[in-house]
Image: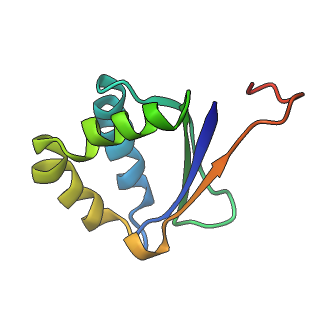
Amino acid sequence: MFYEIRRYQTRPGRRDEWVRYMEGVVIPFQTSKGMTVTASFIDEEDPDGYVWIRRFDDEAQRVELYAAVYESDRWNNEISPAVKELLIPEKSVVTRAVPTPGSALR
């Protein structure tokens, strides 16, 4: 099992709009495709920072879920254009993290 910790930078002043879109559209869509979203956060020190975490059982599941989400018509025609409008894509950082033996997230 591993997690993706995804850090995004919204366009200036658009974080609240982004959070509404994530919670109303992106997260429900991804979970409907089988994705496990374990948390989402706003950055207390960066007014445009947003972080969310997804969990995968293994690499095969990640590949399968990526295809289900990112190759779908709805993602490509509706959701992705809105995401690009709200985020600065080149500032996105994705960290793949494996919990330590004593982690509560194991």
Left or right: 100 with respect to 28? right
Left or right: 89 with respect to 77? right
Can residue 71 be seen here? yes
Depth check: give the residue in front, 3 or 43.
3
Q: Residue at x 10, y 52 (%)?
A: 77
Query: To which quarter of the image does residue 7 belong?
Result: bottom right
Q: Is residue 20 above or below residue 68?
A: below
Q: Quadrant of the C terminus?
A: top right
Q: Position of residue 5 (x, y in %)?
A: 60, 49
Q: Residue at x 67, y 57 (%)?
A: 44
Q: Position of residue 6 (x, y in %)?
A: 54, 53
Q: Position of residue 79 (x, y in %)?
A: 21, 49
In the current view of this chain or complex, which residue is farthest to the front?
60
Can residue 88 be seen here? no
Q: Quadrant of the N terminus?
A: top right
Tag count in the figure? 0
**Coloring scheme of the render?**
rainbow
Q: Residue at x 20, y 46 (%)?
A: 71
Query: To which quarter of the image does residue 28 belong?
Result: top left
Q: Residue at x 55, y 32 (%)?
A: 58
In the current view of this chain or complex, which residue is farthest to the right?
102
Query: To which quarter of the image does residue 98 belong?
Result: top right
Left or right: 40 with respect to 79? right
Q: Is residue 97 above or below residue 36?
A: below
